[in-house]
Image (tube, helix red, strand yellow):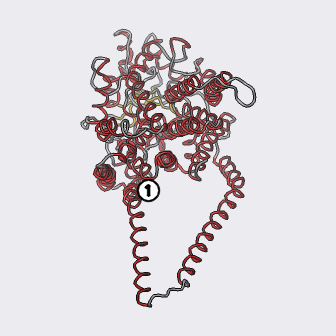
């Protein structure tokens, strides 16, 4: 390791990855209880206590040594004989001290100028962590699935939610967070991965390009609006950013030093990245190609132990293939046991899968690959994606990445100055090629804005290095700082407008859910279900995919899965048969969201009927066999009738 920060980052990456797999094992064994994880964390603290104590003693020792050294220098300066008059000696000392002070200030101001925006943006992020979860993806998948596991105290098969069969490394950490501190701790875990990503960017840039480039790179990352606004949501994107960044970090270290442990570390980081999200395979594939390229480009000489370089290259490729596969093997086995498909719901034509069909597969592929950019010819798609990332500020989501505006003119200058007058560092070439390959793969496969976020951490270093080489770098960096301050202002404005600062009190957070539109209607009916329905109630959700706050047993399908009520109607002769099938599954109530059903039908073809007779059976069932017991603004809670 080149620094303590580098050591800490890789240790934390390995620790969080192992903790995810440990949580998976505990969940499979049926041990999802708070006391289990308190014992686990206590054991970790006890094991690390001795090492941390030695580290603190070492730091204190080095600090005292520096103080003693500076004291000796001051004493020797004061005791130095001076034949000149006293007044001249006083003036010279004053001038020397003044010059030293000016030098210290000149070295201190740039770090202060860079760190001040980062400190300012940290305060609104910490406040927003306490805001209750209201995002759709978190209430359907990222927190809803761990909440279901916690209700059952074990990891089990969840039908009709395809996301629950993914590799869930981040969701395992959220499970631990929900058990120990609620969704606030889960959101803080995701925020921690964002801060660790920033630290990794700084450490990688500082090791190869210097402290100035490291500061610029860190500012570039926090100038990305999407990166800042997603930190306070319980998603898995920043976990993927962190692990892919550390994988590239280890690969660059292996390429420049030739030390094999760095290649092992790279393979481990790729495995944990794939465990966070399947799109981590893009990073693993690019780095595998890099390992092969380095091996082919090396000379076929003999290494010290007598083995041929060809054998070494084969072993390197095997490391990059088998280590990520072994780290994700528990997830593959789990998905295969539950669904018959190790990577469910992907590769459905090859492996098949339970509760899935061709219509769901086509809808899933379209949703994951369509993106939000304009539909153009394939050769124009890279330019359309660049436009989408830079200039499309009118989209419904958060603007993505203004730092690309710095990259484009920087490349023109780089072609003239860096390529002709200077020699590019090897690390910069590796990072630039990685970003280019990632961009092309992303463009022609999954051109969704959030899926490009893992590359933005690496791209921030590329932009930081280019910005540090520009003649007008102070102007450029000032502009990036203004972008960071704009993100801070927007976050603070969001807090002030919605009174989110009150959410530090949990009671105020509950009140916000009751009043904030459009989640208020959903939360009101969920509160009614939690307080008024019997404990053994089981509710079927129709037109509603969010289940996070519901404490009763529910049967629910996501917006990309087979609609449960539609599947039951297809297998029924009439509305009485539908009622019978629902009771056989233990359903006692139905929650119907009219607004959600209309939106899901329009965007995802939620009610995908084979013929009109099925639709007629469904309508007769909804009007004749259900008894409304709660209704508020399109949210209706029904009780099943007794039937014939």
Residue extending furthest toward the left: 394
Query: Callout 1 environment at 10 Å: few (<14), some (14 to 19), or many (20+)?
Result: few
Residue 539 lies, with reference to residue 365, above or below; the image says below
**Percent of width and height locating residue 567:** 46, 16
342 displayed left or right of 431 = right
Q: Quadrant of residue 273?
A: top right
Q: Quadrant of residue 321?
A: top right
- SS state under label 1: helix
Residue extending furthest toward the bottom: 86
Taking the spot 38% from the left edge, 20% from the top edge, the residue there is 366
Total tally of numbered discs in the picture: 1
**Percent of width and height locating residue 389:** 31, 34
**Percent of width and height locating residue 444:** 38, 21
Q: Nearer the viewer, residue 73 or 597?
A: 73
Residue 194 visible in the displayed image: no
Residue extending furthest toward the right: 305
Taking the spot 37% from the left edge, 19% from the top edge, the residue there is 607
**Percent of width and height locating residue 483:** 31, 49
Residue 475 visible in the displayed image: yes
| Residue identifier under label 1 | 507
Q: Nearer the viewer, residue 545 or 631?
A: 545
Q: Nearer the viewer, residue 370 or 9?
A: 9
Q: Nearer the viewer, residue 12 or 38?
A: 12
Residue 93 lies, with reference to residue 360, above or below; the image says below
313 displayed left or right of 403 = right
């Amino acid at each position: 390791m080149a620094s303590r920060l580098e050591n800490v980052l890789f240790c934390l990456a390995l620790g969080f990855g192992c903790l995810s797999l440990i949580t998976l094992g505990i969940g499979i064994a049926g041990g999802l209880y708070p006391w289990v994880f308190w014992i686990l964390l206590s054991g970790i603290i006890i094991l690390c206590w001795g090492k941390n104590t030695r580290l603190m003693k070492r730091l204190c020792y080095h600090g005292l040594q520096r103080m003693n050294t500076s004291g000796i220098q001051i004493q020797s300066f004061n005791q130095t004989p001076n034949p000149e008059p006293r007044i001249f000696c006083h003036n010279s000392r004053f001038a020397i001290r003044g010059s030293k002070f000016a030098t210290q200030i000149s070295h201190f101001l740039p770090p202060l100028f860079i760190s001040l925006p980062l400190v300012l943006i940290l305060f609104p992020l910490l406040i927003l962590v306490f805001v209750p979860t209201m995002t759709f993806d978190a209430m359907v998948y990222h927190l809803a699935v761990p909440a279901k596991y916690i209700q059952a105290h074990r990891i089990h098969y969840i039908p009709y939610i395809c996301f629950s069969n993914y590799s869930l490394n981040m969701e395992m950490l959220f499970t631990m967070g929900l058990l120990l501190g609620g969704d606030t701790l889960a959101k803080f875990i995701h925020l921690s991965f964002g801060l660790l990503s920033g630290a990794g960017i700084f450490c990688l840039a500082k090791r190869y390009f210097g402290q100035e480039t490291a500061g610029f790179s860190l500012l570039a990352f926090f100038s990305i609006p999407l990166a800042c606004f997603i930190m306070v949501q319980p998603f898995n994107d920043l976990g993927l950013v962190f692990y892919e960044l550390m994988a590239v970090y280890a690969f660059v270290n292996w390429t420049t030093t030739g030390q094999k442990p760095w290649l092992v570390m790279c393979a481990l980081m790729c495995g944990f990245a794939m465990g966070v999200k399947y799109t981590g395979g893009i990073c693993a594939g690019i780095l595998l190609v890099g390992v092969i390229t380095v091996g082919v480009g090396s000379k076929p000489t003999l290494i010290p132990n007598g083995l041929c370089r060809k054998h070494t290259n084969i072993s390197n490729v095997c490391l990059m293939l088998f280590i990520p596969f072994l780290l994700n093997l528990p997830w593959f086995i789990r998905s295969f046991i539950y669904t018959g498909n190790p990577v469910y719901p992907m590769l459905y034509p090859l492996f098949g899968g339970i509760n899935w069909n061709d219509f769901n597969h086509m809808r899933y592929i379209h949703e994951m690959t369509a993106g939000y950019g304009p539909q153009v010819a394939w050769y124009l798609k890279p330019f359309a994606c660049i436009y989408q990332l830079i200039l499309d500020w009118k989209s419904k989501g958060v603007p993505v990445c203004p730092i690309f505006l710095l990259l484009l003119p920087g490349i023109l200058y780089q072609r003239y100055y860096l390529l002709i007058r200077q020699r590019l560092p090897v690390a910069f070439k590796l990072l630039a090629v990685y970003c280019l390959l990632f961009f092309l793969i992303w463009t022609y496969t999954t051109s969704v804005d959030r899926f490009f976020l893992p590359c933005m951490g690496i791209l921030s270093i590329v932009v930081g290095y280019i910005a540090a080489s520009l003649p007008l770098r102070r102007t450029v960096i000032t502009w990036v700082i203004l972008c960071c301050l704009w993100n801070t202002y927007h976050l603070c404005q969001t807090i002030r407008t919605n009174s989110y600062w009150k959410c530090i009190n949990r009671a105020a957070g509950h009140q916000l859910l009751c009043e904030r539109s459009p989640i208020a209607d959903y939360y009101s009916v969920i509160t009614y279900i939690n307080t008024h329905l019997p404990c053994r109630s089981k509710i079927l959700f129709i037109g509603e995919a969010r289940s996070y706050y519901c404490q009763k047993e529910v049967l629910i399908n996501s917006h990309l899965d087979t609609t449960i009520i539609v599947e039951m109607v297809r297998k029924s002769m009439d509305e009485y048969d539908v009622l019978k099938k629902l009771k056989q599954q233990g359903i006692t109530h139905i929650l119907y969201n009219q607004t959600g059903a209309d939106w899901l039908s329009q965007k995802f073809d939620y009610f995908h009927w084979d013929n009109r007779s099925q639709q007629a059976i469904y309508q007769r069932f909804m009007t004749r066999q259900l008894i409304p017991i709660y209704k508020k603004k399109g949210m209706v809670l029904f009780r099943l009738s007794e039937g014939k």
